[in-house]
Each structure stands twice: as structure tokens, then as C-alpha cells.
Image (cartoon, helix red, strand yellow):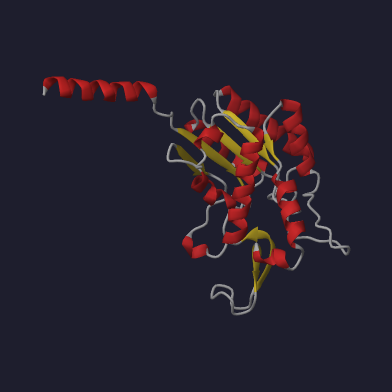
Amino acid sequence: MIKKCFFSLLCLLLVSFSFPAKKKITIYMAGDSTMQTYKESETPMRGWGQYLAEFFTDDVTVKNKAIGGRSTRTFISENRWQRIMDELQKDDWVFIQFGHNDNSSKPERHTTPEDYRNNLRKFVDEVRAKDANPVLLTSITMRKFDKQGVVQTAIGKYTDITREVAREMNVPMIDLNRKTGDYVQSLGAEEAKKLYMWLEPGEHPKYPEGLKDNTHMKEEGAKKVAELAVEGIKELKLKPLVSYLKK
């Protein structure tokens, strides 16, 4: 009996040494309304960031700090960025996606292209200073087609600036603007409505007169964008994030 117990204990010890527990990590998300988490009362609008955790094992915690109407400038001025920095730990990740509101004509949101560039650099530098991992993401495309039926993906100069900063600072970048643009193009203008907040009159009680929103997404669209973001993680082979993805 004693020998049997000793053998069982030895087996357990060997298993524990052979399969060390994965370190739990956190992904912080900094961005705008296309990324944010929406309340049930805000149905059917959804942000892609609220579905990202579904692709990972329980070893990953996603803290979605994205909020609607914010540009890089206002995310900083409202101390939202600083609150992420106060929590951030070594080896954590920060996914950074801005551009829509920086490009806005509304003065309370707008950020000049040069300030936008400097704000992205600030984000990258400060994440790295805490031995954490920044990832830049370009803004998702709007449902905007020209007369020839070609989707117009550019968000002013801001998508290109994100790409330039990623190259300049050697930061991993997921080009969601290109990925969503390609997907929306494959669907075409009419079919793409199912992704966005396009609602016919009477289709949803919250919008009895209907809605034509080419920027924000419903559940189907938000889940697809999250899937495309995960595709980007795999393409970049972001370690150890890829090992935490569900099979």
C-alpha cells in the first residue's frame, strides 16, 4: 500500500515537472467605438474587441478599455491611456487601434496627422518601457463604395501613418483596414450591410425608423473583425500569444 501511494505521488510529481503551467497574461485594448464592448442595452451594436477573448484559452484575460468617440488625443487627455499604464505588467500586451475619430472634423475629437503620429510613438515607447508588448492596428474599413463598386478603405491619412509608425519603430501591426476592406469588397455593397448597423424600419425596436450606419457593426460584423484580428496574430506569429489560441 505504501509503495503504491509512493508510486502515485511520484507520477504526479513527474507530470507537474513535465507540463509547467502557462503564465497568465493580459491583453489590453485601447481604441474607439469600433473596438469597444457594448452593453446589452446597446444591442444590436457591437465592437470587435468584446469577442476577442472567445478565441483564447482561460490563461488570457482581455481588458477592453476602448471607448466610443475617442481619438488618440482625447484618450490621452482623459487619462484613459494612463490608467492602462498604471495596470500594465511585464509581458502583457496592448492592442492599439485609432484613426476614425482622429480623422473627425469635430474639433473636440480631431487630431492633426503629426500629433497622431507622435501619439502612436508615445504609446509604443511607454508600453515597451514597462517590458510589455505593443501591437498597432489600422482602423476597420467603413462600408463606403465608389461608383465602380470599389470599397474606399482610407481613413484620411491615418491608416498610412499607422503603417509608417509600425515600420519605423519595428512594431507588430495587424492591418485590419486592409483585411476588413478585402472582406467587405468580397461581399459587395449590398451584402456588406449585414455586417454594419443597417436596419430596416421596424427591424429592431430600438430603431423603429431604421438606421443606416456604415461605420459601426452588428454582432456578425464584429465577430468577423475579431476573427480577422486573430488571423493577423497567427500571420505575425506573435509569441507566446499564438500558443494561447484555442485549437
Identify the residue at horizontal 65%, vertical 40% (top origin): 232
> Vertical placement of 55 versus 193: above or below?
above
Q: Please tell me which residue lies in front, 80 or 202.
A: 202
| Location of residue 94 (image quadrant) | top right
Identify the residue at horizontal 52%, vertical 63% (top origin): 42
**Left or right position of 234 against 157:** left
Measuring from the top left, give residue 123's x and y in whole percent.
63, 32
| Residue found at the far left of this picture | 1
How many numbered marks appear?
A: 0
> Vertical placement of 63 versus 11: above or below?
below
Q: Please tell me which residue lies in front, 89 or 178.
A: 178
Measuring from the top left, give residue 238's x and y in whole percent.
60, 32
Q: Please tell me which residue lies in front, 171 or 58.
A: 58
Quadrant showing the N terminus: top left
Measuring from the top left, give residue 230's x and y in whole percent.
60, 43
> Vertical placement of 70 versus 197: above or below?
above
Identify the residue at horizontal 53%, vertical 38% (top origin): 28
| Residue found at the far bottom of this picture | 202
